[in-house]
Image (spheres, rainbow, N blue to C red):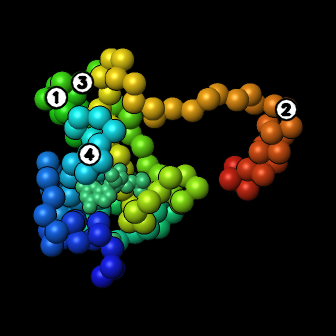
């Protein structure tokens, strides 16, 4: 995609702080980090979101997330990690080129990758169980 900033970064046409690169992915430091070491896994091919990602590449992306997190836990070091992946504007996606956020967490860092827990009502449960029958092949 010629007008996609992450395509240009992934291709190396726009410089970035690249902490890892292979044939399929570039892992860069986020320009607006939630915490020190916040990185993004970018596929080199353009896919807008998780639903567009080919299964094999998506699997590779998660394996790479594990590799980077495992390394960085010791290298930074940090106390935990959020692995976050936003799809759609409503979910906070601002760059429509698939990416995985790797956010290091430090004890009492106050970083807000969280939500206020609601309650699973019987009505919601029944509705969702009904709507997911196809998912289970029922
Ligand atoms: P999203 O909100 O789409 O899940 O995440 C987009 C992320 O990309 C944000 O965390 C933002 O800080 C980061 N970002 C946006 N533009 C650039 C850029 O040009 N370079 C880098 N390194 N990060 C960017
Ligand atoms: Zn792109």
Question: Which residue carries the number 2 mark?
Answer: 122
Of tags 2 and 1, the one toward the viewer is: 1
Which of pointers 4 and 1 lies earlier in the amino acid sequence? Answer: 4
Mark 3 → mark 1, Cα distance in angstroms: 6 Å
Lower sequence index among marks 4 and 2 = 4
Instruction: Report the Cα–Cα distance between label 4 and label 1.
Output: 12 Å
Q: Which quadrant of the figure shows ligand 1?
A: bottom left
Along the line of sight, which residue is nearer the eye, 72 or 34?
Answer: 34
Question: At x 81% / y 31%, what residue is drawn?
Answer: 121
Question: Mark on residue 78?
Answer: 3
Q: In this view, does 46 lie to the left or right of 9?
A: right
Sequence-first disc among 2 and 3: 3
Horizontal placement of 77 versus 109: left or right?
Answer: left
> What residue lies at 80% left-to-right and 39% top-to-bottom?
124
The residue indicated by pointer 4 is 39
Q: Where is residue 9 in the image (x, y as percent from the top left)?
A: 21, 66
């Amino acid at each position: 995609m010629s007008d996609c900033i992450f395509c240009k970064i992934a291709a190396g046409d726009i410089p970035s702080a690249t902490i890892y690169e292979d044939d399929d992915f570039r892992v860069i430091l986020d320009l607006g980090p939630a915490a020190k070491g916040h990185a993004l896994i970018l596929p080199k091919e353009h896919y807008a979101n998780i639903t567009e990602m080919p299964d094999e590449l998506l699997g590779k992306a998660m394996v790479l997330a594990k590799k980077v997190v495992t390394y960085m836990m010791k290298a930074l070091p940090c106390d935990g990690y959020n692995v976050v992946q936003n799809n759609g504007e409503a979910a906070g996606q601002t760059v429509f080129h698939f990416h995985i956020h790797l956010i290091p967490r430090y004890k009492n860092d106050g970083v807000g990758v969280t939500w206020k827990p609601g309650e699973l009502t019987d009505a919601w449960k029944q509705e969702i169980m009904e709507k997911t029958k196809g998912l289970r092949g029922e």
